[in-house]
């Protein structure tokens, strides 16, 4: 993405696109999918899960607005012990 004129060409292609398209095109280039990498054999990433534009309904609010990130990566429930989940 950042070599030679590729970055500028990518910027030109997404210039008139909506936010969802820009996020989709650029994010995967900058931040490869953890779940996809796990599928291709990176075992250490199998405990991760991704979400796209999902509200964090179970989060403890810091602001009045519920967080809803464009993209996030977190640990699967299975990554924690029962004691850790109780806390």
Image (tube, rainbow, N blue to C red):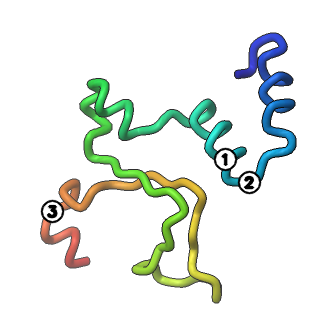
Residue denoted by label 2: 19
Residue under pointer 3: 81
Q: Which label lies toward us, 3 or 2? A: 2
How far is the residue under mark 2 from the one under mark 1?
6 Å
Q: CA distance from mark 3 to mark 2?
A: 38 Å
Task: Between residue 27 and residue 25, name the one nearer to us.
Answer: 25
- Residue that mark 1 sits on: 23
Residue furthest bottom in the image: 64
Q: Secondary structure at mark 3?
A: loop
Give the residue displayed 35% in from the left and 51% down from the top: 49
Secondary structure state at the residue bearing disc 2 = helix
Task: State which tag comes first along the sequence, 1 or 3.
Answer: 1
**Quarter of image, res 65:** bottom right
User: Pointer 3: residues within 10 angstroms few (<14), some, or many (20+)?
Assistant: few
Image point 67% across, 37% down: which residue? 26
Place of residue 17 in the rendered image (x, y in percent of width and height, measured from the top left)? 79, 46
């Amino acid at each position: 993405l950042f070599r030679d004129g590729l970055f500028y060409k990518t910027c030109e292609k997404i210039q008139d696109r909506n936010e969802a398209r820009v996020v989709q095109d650029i994010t995967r280039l900058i931040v490869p999918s953890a779940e996809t990498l796990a599928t291709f054999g990176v075992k250490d990433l199998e405990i991760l899960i991704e979400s796209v534009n999902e509200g964090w309904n179970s989060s403890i609010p810091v602001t009045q607005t519920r967080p809803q990130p464009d993209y996030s990566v977190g640990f699967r429930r299975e990554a924690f012990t029962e004691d850790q989940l109780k806390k």
